[in-house]
Amino acid sequence: MKIKNNSYRGWFLILCAVLLFTMVLNISLGSVSIPFGATLNTLLGQDIDNSSWNYIIIDYRLPKALTAILVGGGLAVSGLLMQTLFRNPLAGPFVLGISSGASLGAALLLMGGSLLSGATVFNMVNDISLAIASSIGSFLVLAVVMLVANKIKDTMALLIIGLMFGSITAAIVSVLAYFSDAEQLQRFVFWSYGSVGNLSWSQLGILASSTVTGLLLAILSLKSLNAFLLGENYAKSLGVALRKSRLLIIVATGLLAGSITAFAGPIAFIGLAVPHLTRQLFHTMDHRVLLPAVFLYGAILMLLCDTIAQLPNSASVLPINAITSIVGAPVVIWLLVRKRKMIF
């Protein structure tokens, strides 16, 4: 990717440096405080005297930090894709009902036993089975949305249909919650809080594969995304295959948002707000610049929110969803008041 404006290169260098710093800071802070230098030496492959620090960093905090990078960057990119496709500044990565589908899959696993008495499979819940159930739910909804997208030409109608799918799945989840007992409901509520700290290295590999695939599809859609900014008729006049491009963007969003929700739960705010925050910084609508910038910005913000959520020097951990909204929403409000309008 060639960036003509040298100021963009400077901002990218700054974002990369901030990302590395926030990653090391995130790994250093927690219930056990580890010196910044010791953390950096461990990440660089150097031996440190404290073996317990090495174990904490390599087996727990490094996977968590990498998960936060994938989650923040992936959700931010999927939000950018949806805002551009629907030309709606309020569109996020979950407007197609993908998050609701993942929630439905998780709800069926965690609370479905109330309706299917005697089915022991619902009592055998672990992180892997929960991720599988959430993935199946999100991709079933995605498959239906893609089928509908192949039949209709109006993008706004597709947006409304996606919202309706989200409403239907949310209604089913509410029914399951009504009939579930307190323990099942509590497990589902804890899942809905979101978390980036529960993945093993093997699960992280699966999440990374899905996220990278989604990002590659988004990169293939760069020309179409820039054309969609001026409307579908303009894009068509440039030779963009509208139906194929829409499906490619939807699949990319589904892979990103679906896999992230499956492994980390529904994470609020990041996908909606980060594209706007990035536009305020870069002052461009060119997706060749925006897409990598949005990924870096989202990753940094997610690392910062996770650092706050883990309450350094405390054994308690706050819900990551609460932190992303509490930290992020005032920033967006301040920008809107200051700038008077969003750049879109």
Image: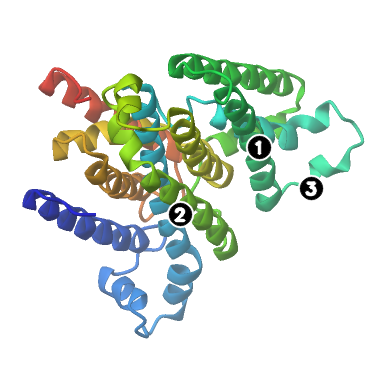
Is the residue 128 above or below the residue 75 in the image?
A: below
User: Of marks 1 and 2, which one's residue comes earlier in the chain?
Assistant: 1
Seen at 53% across and 52% down, the residue is: 210
Q: State left or right for residue 291 relative to residue 216.
A: left
Q: State left or right for residue 121 relative to residue 156.
A: right
Quarter of the figure with residue 44: bottom left
Give how far across and how far down residue 85 sits, in percent. Answer: 38, 27
The residue identified by callout 2 is 212
Report whether residue 40 is seen. Answer: yes
The residue identified by callout 1 is 187
Give how far across and how far down residue 20 sits, in percent. Answer: 27, 61
Question: Identity of the amino acid at label 3?
Answer: Met
Q: State left or right for residue 324 relative to residue 170.
A: left
Question: Identity of the amino acid at label 1?
Answer: Arg
Q: For the residue labelled by badge 1, is the local secondary structure a helix, a strand or a loop?
A: helix
Looking at the rendering, in which quadrant would you find the C terminus? Answer: top left
Quarter of the figure with residue 169: top right
Question: In whole angstroms, how far apart are the C-alphas of marks 1 and 3?
Answer: 13 Å
Seen at 25% across and 45% down, the residue is: 288
Q: For the residue labelled by badge 2, is the local secondary structure a helix, a strand or a loop?
A: helix
Give how far across and how far down residue 143 sits, in percent. Answer: 63, 33
Looking at the rendering, in which quadrant would you find the N terminus? Answer: bottom left
Seen at 51% across and 69% down, the residue is: 59
The residue identified by callout 3 is 124
